[in-house]
Each structure stands twice: as C-alpha cells, then as structure tokens.
Amino acid sequence: MPTGFSNIVPDLAVEILSPEDRPRAVLDKVGEYLEAGVSLVWVVEPEAKTAAVHRGPVAVDEAGPGGALDGEDVVPGFRCVLAEILR
C-alpha cells in the first residue's frame, strides 16, 4: 500500500474551518497548496458564514454571507451560494 502524499496536484482545494483552527496554521496550509500548484483555494468559515478565495499569495477575495463561491476557470459553471450551504 502506498504511503506519503500523492504527486497529483488538485486544481481546487477547500478547507472548512473548525473553531480549533488557528489562523496562522490555515494560512500556512493555503501557502503550501498554492506553492504546490493548486490554482484555487477556498477557506470556508462556517460560523461567520464567509469564505476566503485564494488564487495566489496576495490574490485573496472575500465572499460574505450573501456571497457565492465560483468555480471560475477551474470548475467552469460551478457556483455555490454560501447562505444555501451554511445555515
């Protein structure tokens, strides 16, 4: 059975935060995803009903409670309204 990490880099990574997650640790993980070649990273904060959309180290957008996550060119046609999934 294989051990370790896969050599396949996903196009999209999604992190769902828990109350125990530390901001610095999450940002480090996002940086690792981007450094590995992930094109789009969503960090969803269920308690605040928000999400951060990372496309690069400094390319970050916020989606508020009324906002949506868009798959852009990574997952064309995919759109998810936060209010519909974070109730």
Image (cartoon, rainbow, N blue to C red):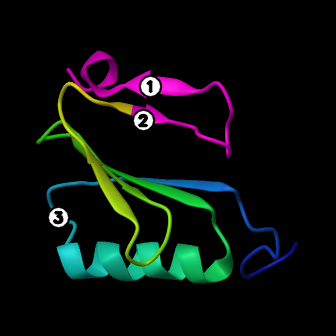
Q: What residue type is labelled 2?
A: Leu
Q: How far apart are marks 3 and 1 (CA)?
A: 25 Å
Classify 10 Å Cα crowding around label 1: few (below 14), some (14-19), many (20 and above): few
Q: Which mark is residue 69?
A: 2
Q: Whole-percent x and y of residue 24?
A: 23, 81
Classify 10 Å Cα crowding around label 3: few (below 14), some (14-19), many (20 and above): few
Marks counted in the figure total 3
Q: Whole-percent x and y of residue 52?
A: 31, 53
Please say whether residue 58 is one of the residues in the magenta stretch: no
Give the residue drawn at x 35%, y 62%.
60
Instruction: Find disc 1 in the rendering and name its residue.
Output: 80
Is there any visible trace of residue 20 in the rendered image? yes
Quarter occupied by residue 71: top right
Q: How far apart are marks 2 and 3 (CA)?
A: 23 Å
Question: Label 3 near label 2: C-beta < 8 Å?
Answer: no
Above or below residue 87? Residue 52 is: below
Q: Residue furthest top?
A: 84
Q: Whole-percent x and y of residue 34?
A: 55, 75
Q: From the viewer's perspective, is 73 left or right of 16?
A: right
Q: Closer to the N terminus: mark 3 or mark 1? A: 3
Question: Label 1 near label 2: C-beta < 8 Å?
Answer: yes
Q: What element carries label 3?
A: loop
The mark closer to the camera, 2 or 3, is 2
Quarter occupied by residue 2: bottom right
Above or below residue 29? Residue 83 is: above
Give the residue drawn at x 69%, y 56%.
11
Instruction: Find disc 3 in the rendering and name its residue.
Output: 20
Q: What stretch is highlighted in magenta?
A: 69-87
The mark closer to the camera, 3 or 1, is 1
